[in-house]
Structures are given as C-alpha cells and as structure tokens.
Image: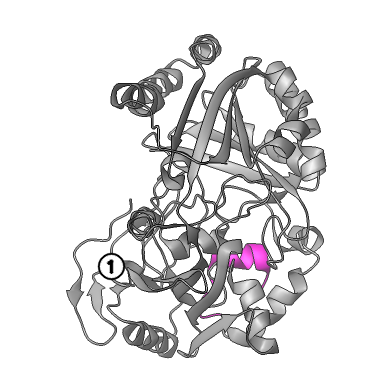
Amino acid sequence: MATTGTASKSGPGGGTAPATAWRNWAGNVSATPARVVTPASVGELQEVVRRAASDGLRVKAVGTGHSFTSAAATDGVLVRPQALAGIRGIDRAAGTVTVEAGTVLKDLNVALAREGLSLTNMGDIMEQTVSGATSTGTHGTGRDSASLSAQIRALELVTADGRLLTCSEEGDDEERAVFAAARLGIGALGVVTAITFAVEPLFFLTAREEPMAFDRVTAEFDQHVAENEHFEFYWFPHTGNCNTKRNNRSQGPAAPPGAVSAWVEDELLSNGIFQAVNSLGRAVPAAIPGIARIASRALSARTYTDIPYKVYTSPRRVRFVEMEYALPRERAVEALRELKAMVDRSSLRISFPVEVRTAPADDITLSTASGRDTAYIAVHMYKGTPYHAYFTAAEQIFTAHGGRPHWGKVHTRDAEYFARAYPRFGEFTALRDRLDPERVFANDYLRRVLGD
C-alpha cells in the first residue's frame, strides 16, 4: 500500500500531511501533491474541496493505490479517506448496507459475515477501499451477477462546489442521471463519501478448481459460462495448459481446504514460490517457458466450500502490472486464440498467467460491461519487468475486437476512442460539465480519457 507519512492537524479540513511523494501499489505511478489530507468527517471533506477550489488546486481521492493508471495522481490536494470508514447502517428489510467511502473491502466482508450477510459477487482481492474499487470498475466473474458498481443502490459524494449530493435509482431525473454515471465515476464527478450496496443473507459457495487444456477450455467456454454461476480460467503462456475455477452456490456446510493444503496452495505456491519463480524469470527470461510448463503441469484439482469472500478472494502478495480489456463475450475466444498465437510466435517471455472472466450487461454509463454481455481478458507482467511490448501487442488484439480497457489498469486509449466504444459517453461528459465545470477533480489521466 502507498503511504504518505504522518498526518498532523493543520487548519481546516482534518489532518494535513506535508508534501511527500505518493506511489501506487505496483510502483508504476507516482505523484507529489501539494497537500495530503485525511478528513475525519464529511463536513471536513467538504471544506477541503472548497478550500482547494479557492486556492486553485485540483483534488483527487486515493484509496490503497491498487490502480495501475494515474487516475488518482495529482499535484494538488490528495484526499485519503481512511478515516471515513465503517458501516453506517444495515437495512435488512431493504437488503442494503451503507458504508463510508474509506472502508476496506476486507473489513466490509468480515463485518457483513458477522451480521449473516454478504455481497453477491466480488473481485479476487479485497485490499481496496469501496470507493476506489467501484470508481474504477472492480469486478469478479459471474454469469448473472455483475461488478461491485452494479451492486450499488445509492451513493453520496461531495461535488466541486462543496455540496453533498445523494443519488439513487429512486431520485428525480438529475439524481438518476448522476447515479447512472457516479457508480463508476473514475473520480471525475466528485469525491465519494458513502455507498449503499445491495446485500443478501450469507450463503455458501462450492469451488471446483481443475486443470484443463487450452484448446478444450476455449472450445467449451460458452458451455462453462452457461452451466456455472461463476466461471473463470487462467492460461499459462508458453503452454497449452489452463487452470479453471467454477464457483456455485451450495447448501453447505463449510468444508474449506485443510490448513496445510490451504497454506501450500495459497501461500507457498501462489505467493512464495511464485515470487521466487518471477524473480528468476526477470533475471533469466529464457528460463520462463520451461518454468511455465513445469508449473502448469504441477496443478491438481481441488474442491472446497465456504462463505463467499473466502471463495471469491485470494491473497495477492506478488506485485505486478496489469492490463485488462472487456470484450463482447462472443469475441473473447477468438481474441484469446490470437493472443496465444502472438505469444507463441514472438520472443516475449511471460511468467504471469492470463486471466479470463465474465460479466452480464449492466446499465452504468461507463461500465466496461455497459449494454453488453462481457468477457474480460487480463494480462500481467511481474513488477520491474519491461511490459510495453507485450501490452502493446495485446492491446492491438483487444481493440480490434471492440475492447474497452479497465479504467484502473494500464492502457493507451483516449477520449476519441471511448466516444466510439461507449454509446453513452456524451452523457457522462455532459454531466461532468454540469458538476465540475472548473475541473476541480481533473488530472492528466482524466484529460486523456474524457477530454477537456
């Protein structure tokens, strides 16, 4: 996680730290803000925004820095919402929970489980804040259940003039327009202060992890998606091998992996040995294909049952840089086969698996799944390894298939591309013009992806 030093009280707007460099989790983005603030209340945050606008400074909020883009970078005022954390309230009749923006997903999941509740779907890590995760479009995989942003039922944010705005599906025309966009706002519309999520009674998931050949899993992709509530797979470059994961609801009881086997799979293999293998591959790239063949053949099947967040999520301690594109689901297999062919004929050496997930269409203005059933293909490179050649080649394939890049992961697309990729792009930029005409929340990244 990124750190900003020790905050001290310094005038209005809560804790203010001296200017210091901020760096994201992967280490590929850094910034030096003029001020770093940690407001202790929504009122203090409103004053932070008003004061920054008066001083001619831009404002950006940053969570735990898990985005790979510079979406949160600023040379103005960097807002850290960690003091705005915790559950505000649970409405069991409505099936919702309202949480402060700085709440970390891990803490939310644990707290909900204590209350006998759960989110319906989630991504595979839970170190992000709820506001950071939803603002960039964090998602898991699901046949019927969509991203975290699609599970939002109401939203509260501070706008550029310091107003506190609440929006939901139940509001007036303006509130509904804001709600449609701000559930995934990329930090362009305001600073999110609270989110109301749909939740449901705690349930069990049975996970089946199984090695499978690349040719088989791609040939049967549509079948696997149709037959499972949550299907994903990982292809190991330089091999014809994949690992698949199918998560489906069950009656229980919980039957988690044994303590020893869980440590071996999730810590020793997925983190400890994987870290060592990637370090070796970075030092000796020629060894990567051989290592990949050995590692992918060493996988074995396993089945376990547990509550949702213990099945959906995994510890991720090996740091990397990532690009992910959302493709129309019917184009995913063709694109993936092209990606494999490109890697096979190239001199690239890729030590990280390629991840494939799905999501149903949603109605969020700039969601990567907006208006279409979607498949996600994510490519990764170990931290400190040159990634531009691989990502450039992959991006050419993804864009040729109508791909939309994840807002928080590496890409080179601009506003002209997005205006073609998103039918409702103009709705978002027009709303931004109304809410932030002076671009209090602007930065270089937003200027590139939204225009100015």
**Where residue 120 sits: x, y (%)?**
54, 54
Q: Is residue 147 left or right of residue 60?
A: right
Q: Residue at x 57, y 85 (%)?
A: 438
Mark yes or no: residue 302 visible: yes
Closest to the observer, 243 or 74: 243
Q: Residue at x 54, y 10 (%)?
A: 297
Which residues make up the magenta segment? 439-452
Q: Residue at x 64, y 63 (%)?
A: 448
Above or below 66: residue 294: above
**Where residue 307 sits: x, y (%)?**
43, 44
Q: Is residue 35 left or right of residue 198?
A: left
The residue under label 1 is 19
**Where residue 304 sits: x, y (%)?**
45, 30
Amino acid carrying mark 1 in the image: Ala
**Where residue 25 sits: x, y (%)?**
39, 48
Q: Residues within 10 Å of mark 1 (few under 14, many from 20)?
A: some
The secondary structure type at the circle numbered 1 is: loop
Mark yes or no: residue 349 visible: no
**Which quarter of the image is occupied by the C terminus?**
bottom right
Residue 446 magenta: yes
Closest to the observer, 449 or 374: 374
